[in-house]
Amino acid sequence: MYHSSTDMAIRKFIKTSLEHRSLDLLPAAQNPANSGNQKAAKNTRLQPVAVSDLVHYRTPNQAILSHDHLAEIVPRPSGSRCIAYADGAYLPDRDTAGIGVYFLNPSLPPLSQRLAGYQSNARAEIHAIVLALTRLSAILLSSEGGSGWREIWVCSDSRYAVNGVNVYMETWEQSCWLTNKGRPIANRRAFQMLHKAIRQLSDRGFTVFIHHLPAHAGISGNEIADMLAKAGALL
């Protein structure tokens, strides 16, 4: 069971952290009086931040990934496509883990939650994707879910979680979620929850993509999801 937090303290933590990193990425609530600024706000939400725009927060990824490269690998929203960014975080000094989900659609609020059960970064990364899919399932499979979306993209910077879905999951399912030595795979229950969440959507005609993106490369959705996950670990 997850427990969501949307209180002002968490929102302030995320906003302050992003400002410290020189990332103006969390859109403020739209005011009709500011309708002339809507186009700029839209571009801020949906486009990856250029490497040159990041002044105080640089990592090796930003030295090798150009703006053009990022534009090629970052999925773009459309009328039939919903995009979410999911991330997990583990704070070793507190031994706590959190999960965060950021949706590009402004009508869907971000999610910041403490991970239940065993605290680890790997579990948090998997459960963040599960949370994104289950939240969307609740909307899309409801009687009001006439959004027009047919593609669901969940972006994660965890190669472990993404490969678990795209490379190994079919084999795991066929082997009853056991390794070739007959032992349960690591994080079996988490991956089984993820498999169920994907199947629930795909059985209703939605195409689900679990997409890997590099961490800390100036991709706005990734950076926001990272802050949401860290905030969740502090709950």
Image (tube, rainbow, N blue to C red):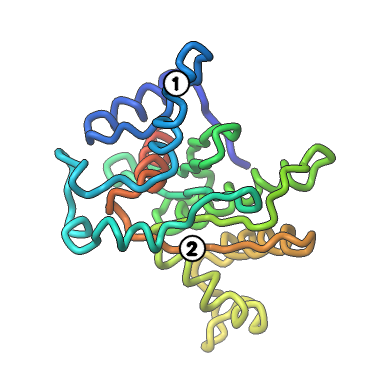
Q: Amino acid at mark 2?
A: His
The quarter of the rendered structure image containing the C terminus is top left
Q: Residue at x 33, y 58 (%)?
A: 70
Residue at the limit of the structure toward the bottom, as seen here: 180
Left or right? Give the position of 14 relative to 184: left
The picture quadrant where one finds residue 36 is top left
Q: Residues within 10 Å of mark 2 (few under 14, many from 20)?
A: many
Q: Is residue 26 above or below residue 12?
A: below
Q: What is the number of the mark on residue 211? A: 2
Residue at which label 1 appears: 36
Where residue 192 appears, as percent x and y from the top left, is: 63, 64
Left or right? Give the position of 188 relative to 225: right
* Numbered disc 1: secondary structure: helix
Separation of residues labelled 1 and 2 (CA atoms)? 34 Å
Q: Residues within 10 Å of mark 1 (few under 14, many from 20)?
A: few
Q: Is residue 186 above or below residue 206?
A: below
Q: Residue at x 53, y 73 (%)?
A: 166
The quarter of the rendered structure image containing the N terminus is top right
Q: In front: 178, or 206?
A: 206
Where residue 152 appears, as percent x and y from the top left, is: 62, 55
Residue at the limit of the structure toward the top, as seen here: 33
The reply to whether dot 1 and dot 2 touch (C-beta < 8 Å) is: no
Left or right? Give the position of 30 relative to 22: right
Left or right? Give the position of 103 relative to 46: right
Q: Earlier in the sequence, mark 1 or mark 2?
A: 1
Q: What is the number of the mark on residue 227? A: none
Q: Residue at x 43, y 49 (%)?
A: 87
Q: Is residue 163 above or below residue 201?
A: below
Q: In front: 98, or 64?
A: 64
Where residue 154 appears, as percent x and y from the top left, is: 53, 55
Q: In front: 192, or 60?
A: 60
